[in-house]
Image (cartoon, rainbow, N blue to C red):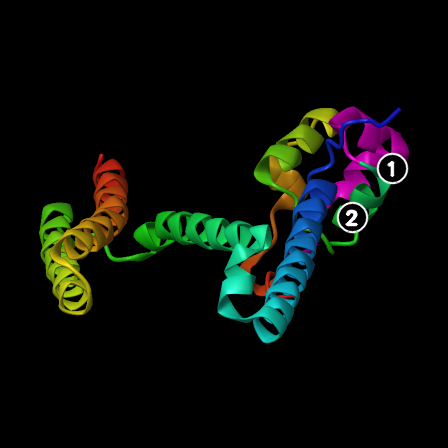
Amino acid sequence: MMKKITDERLQLKNLKNIRVLFLIQTVGIIAILGYDLVTKGMEGMTANPLWLVFIITGVASAYLSMGISIDHESSEKSPKKGLIISLFVSVIVAIGFGILITLTGDLATGTLIGGIVFVCCLAPSLYMYYLRMKRQN
Amino acid sequence: MKNNVKLARVQVDLTQQELAEKVGITRQTVSLIEKGKYNPSLKLCLAICDVVNQSLDELFWVDKEDRAK
């Protein structure tokens, strides 16, 4: 029967092994997606479920890194100021996208895409704000 | 980093295997700690101290000049 590993050195080694495995999988996924991109084009690549896995991993990785960079940055920054700046930038980027899409398509699509871009920028800003507030306490 | 784990273990008449079992690690890890090739966590250090009835100071204290080794 498998015994639970209590040895901290082996647990650490296990984690390091998982890192190597992750690297192998990532290289594999990129290789498969690259192959799809060459043989079937962009549409073919994004139709592959692996694309979704790749994107979700990327998003998860970005959110996890936020937790690290918050601890790394100097603590003098005010969380509120950071949030206001991020919101301002989000609004500008969203309006920019909205205008560009409206110019090439119609207003409804422009508004929709702009809204989506805004929400996509808003979520990480709020998460950063939450992490900074949590650190201050 | 240098330490006195081996000395302390011999003093209480334990083998590497016995010490390992008492603190819930493997014999190889005990060996690496004694050779100074693995840095144990504070938690593990304290567990070892408990088993050999010595203080953290006695087991793991290293003078500043020797720390770089």
**What's the residue type where badge 1 is placed?**
Gln
Residue corresponding to mark 1: B16
Where residue A16 appears, x then y in whole percent?
A: 67, 52
Residue at left offset 69%, top offset 41%? A11
User: Which residue is farthest front?
Assistant: A106
From this view, report whether residue A20 is shown above or below residue B29.
below
Where residue A37 appears, x then y in whole percent?
A: 57, 71
Compare residues B47 and A33 and report the one nearer the observer. A33
Q: Mark 1 falls on what kind of element?
A: helix
Residue B9 in magenta? yes
Predominant secondary structure, magenta span: helix
* Left or right side of A59 for B37: right
Compare residues B68 and A5 and report the one nearer the observer. A5
Give the chain of mark 1: B
Residue corresponding to mark 2: B34
Which image quadrant for residue A127? top left
From this view, report whether residue B18 is shown above or below residue A123.
above
Residue B7 in magenta? yes
Q: Mark 2 falls on what kind of element?
A: helix
User: Which residue is farthest bottom?
Assistant: A38
Q: Which residues are magenta?
A: B1-25
Which disc is residue A35 wearing?
Answer: none
Is disc 1 on the same chain as disc 2?
yes
From this view, report whether residue A45 is shown above or below residue A53.
below
* Left or right side of B16 for A113: left
